[in-house]
Image (cartoon, grey):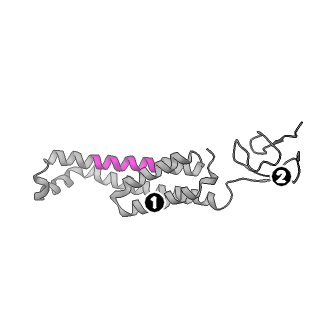
Amino acid sequence: MDDINFCPACGKNVSPGTLFCPACGMRLNAAEGRGTVVTKYTTATDGVPAGRAKIAAALLLINAAILFLFAFFILTSAAELAQEMFDMPIFADLYTVEEMTELIRQIGMASAAGGAVGVIAAVLALMRRLWVAAIILCLMSASVGLMSLIGVVLGLIAFWMLLKARPVFRD
């Protein structure tokens, strides 16, 4: 009968010679040979990829803060902005002041939603869970960030960092 080792992090049975625990992703450094007990281990989250996940989370949180501030500004001054836009001939022919106010409020709500999505993506990146969901939410937040150039830049850099941090995600 083959000897079986245990992961020191989660206790799951692992076959001799296994480099990573299939349950939790812990990197296992066993001595040479079959049936040896794991004596030294390091987590797979140590090193550069883990740092990239943290950087991505920080960028996503900065982008979310910008989106929340933009949403607050838009939602608190929608009527004034609509009146200023209505004074321009190009908009006066297309919308009423009420329609323009509602459109501006919807932009503000979309910005707030993009900020919330960015926060969720940042939490997933910090927890190193659900990589695919983190990537999708990051792109969603960046697309809402199209309202500002910095939002797009932050979102794309965060996306790139999440792509490079794939090995540290446990999903």
Q: Identify the secondary structure beneath mark 1.
A: helix
Q: In 3D space, how far apart are the residues under numbered discs 2 and 1 (Cα atoms)?
A: 39 Å
The mark nearer the N terminus, 2 or 1, is: 2
Above or below for 17 versus 155: above
Picture coordinates of residue 46, whole percent (x, y)? 69, 57
Callout 2, which amino acid? Ala
Q: Residue at x 69, y 44 (%)?
A: 24
Count of all numbered marks drawn on residues in the image: 2
Which residue corresponds to mark 2? 30
Q: Which numbered marker is on residue 82?
A: none
Q: In the image, 148: left or right of 44?
A: left
Q: Main secondary structure of the magenta part?
A: helix
Q: Quadrant for residue 161, please give it.
A: bottom right
Callout 1, which amino acid? Leu
Q: Nearer the viewer, residue 36 or 98?
A: 36
| The furthest residue to the top | 1
Q: Residue at x 61, y 50 (%)?
A: 169
Q: Quadrant of the C terminus?
A: top right
Instruction: Magenta stretch: give its range.
Output: 106-118
Q: In the image, 41: left or right of 125?
A: right
| The furthest residue to the front | 1
